[in-house]
Amino acid sequence: MNPHPPMESWSRYAAGLGGAPERLAMERHLESCELCLEAFQAAALAEEPARDECPEQAALAERLRGEALERVRAAVLDELAREQADAERRPPPRRRSWTRHPAFHYGLAAALTLLLLGSGALGELGRQLEHAASAHPPQPSLSAERPAAAEEESWSSRVVDRTSRLLQEWQSARYRDGGAS
């Protein structure tokens, strides 16, 4: 950050004194420092009674002050225009759809489970799975070391597997259709 020029520098600037590089540096500092802008305004007001002494110098100082203020004003307007153009170019932030939130998925799964339990559909699904399991007895294992109980899959595991396959089918169908559902 630029150090603040002393009040004497602002007085010289307000009087129109100093070289072009010094004046340009002072103007650039004015663009970004409100504290120094107030110091410049105070120096300009203090300079007004001194202008009455020499009309030519007063006219030159007034012209230079007007030019300096106009350059500062133009720089500020350019910066505002740049900021607005940048803001217009940036795309608006996208909000995630509520259907993509994990809480929605958990809530939907819980609601479906309660609905299926309440309607008795899970009981019917369990009976169908037991009937299918009895129609296709498990193949005997080649390894005699594993007990028979470990080979049998529990009823709840079969329900979970069947439900997960069903949900995967729904999801793949949804994304195959382009997410229209």
Image (cartoon, rainbow, N blue to C red):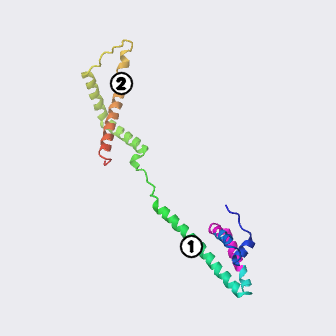
Q: Main secondary structure of the magenta part?
A: helix
**Within-10-Å neighbours for mark 2: few <14, some 14–19, many 20+:** few
- Residue 165 falls in which quadrant of the image? top left
Residue at which label 1 appears: 74
Q: Which mark is residue 99?
A: none
Residue 22, relative to residue 89: is it above or below?
below
**In this picture, which residue range is highlighted in magenta?**
28-45
Query: What is the three-letter code of the residue carrying label 2?
Result: Ser
- Residue 148 falls in which quadrant of the image? top left
Q: Disc 2 to disc 1, how far (Cα)?
A: 79 Å
Q: Is residue 56 or residue 164 the one in the foreground?
A: 56
Residue 181, given in percent of the width and then of the height, sits at 31, 47
**Within-10-Å neighbours for mark 1: few <14, some 14–19, many 20+:** few
For the point 63% across and 66% down, which residue is it? 32
Residue 128, relative to residue 12: is it above or below?
above
Residue at which label 2 appears: 154
Query: What is the three-letter code of the residue carrying label 1?
Result: Ala
